[in-house]
Amino acid sequence: NKIEKYLEKQGVTELKYLIATHPHADHIGEMSEIIDQFQVDKFIMPKVKADMTPTTTIYEKMLKSIKAKGLKITQAKPMEFELGSCKVKLFTPKKDYDDLNNYSTLVKITDGENSFLITGDCETTEEKDILSQGYDVSAKVLNAGHHGSSTSSGVDFLNKVMPRYAVISCGKGNKYGHPHEETVTRLKKYASHLYVTADVGTIVFSSDGEGLSVSTEKGEK
């Protein structure tokens, strides 16, 4: 329950928006607990093809928590809203795919001069879809897609994002070999600062609308 404990430590009691980028277990693993523990005003998740709807226990548990709280699932679609001092935009693919990764909802958060792009497991296939729709994906901080896999963070996409900072979220010694060397090399050509959770632990960016600070903290083994 690391995420739940982290939010509680920050004094969070309510989540105005809770976004599941896509329904893969490693991206919704703690959603059930989050929904149970906090007041959630709106839950957003992409709609996928019927034959791709997950049957995992984690997915079913999340749906039960949503139902128990009387929440409705809002289908992810291009939208924007304000949250405190931030402007939030959601970008979604327009085509259907055979891989849940490419249904990922991209979230861009802008706070004054600072901007952050969170990409879920978006692969180059979806990146091309997103770019074809003309979205402004430029961001100072990029949360690289699919845990630093070679299938994501393509050159065309990075040319539009132009990040100064890049973050790769992956477990130490994971069986997929993430992050892949070619992706790390590619990201370093754009971002002057690259952080990998497997190496530095939890990564927190703090913005005041002008300045940007970064802190890292390794958890218990």
Image (cartoon, helix red, strand yellow):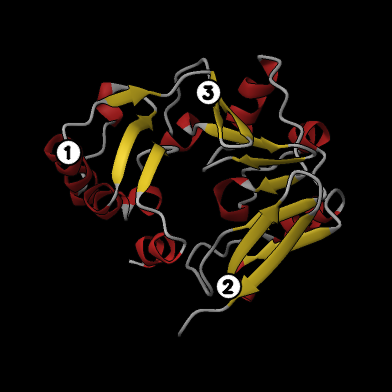
Left or right of 159 in this view: 171? left
The amino acid type found where label 3 is placed reads: Thr
Q: Quadrant of residue 147?
A: bottom right
Tag 3 secondary structure: loop
Mark 3–mark 2 Cα distance, whole angstroms, equals 29 Å
The amino acid type found where label 2 is placed reads: Gly
- Number of residues whose C-alpha sits closer than 10 Å to that of mark 3, classed few (under 14), some (14–19) or many (20 or more): many
The location of residue 72, given as percent across then percent down, is: 24, 26
Residue named by callout 2 = 201
**Closest to the observer: 80 or 166?**
80
Residue named by callout 3 = 92
Tag 1 secondary structure: loop
**Closest to the observer: 44 or 127?**
44
Q: Who comes first in sequence, dot 2 or dot 1? A: 1
Mark 3–mark 1 Cα distance, whole angstroms, equals 26 Å
**Quadrant location of the N terminus in the rendered image:** bottom left
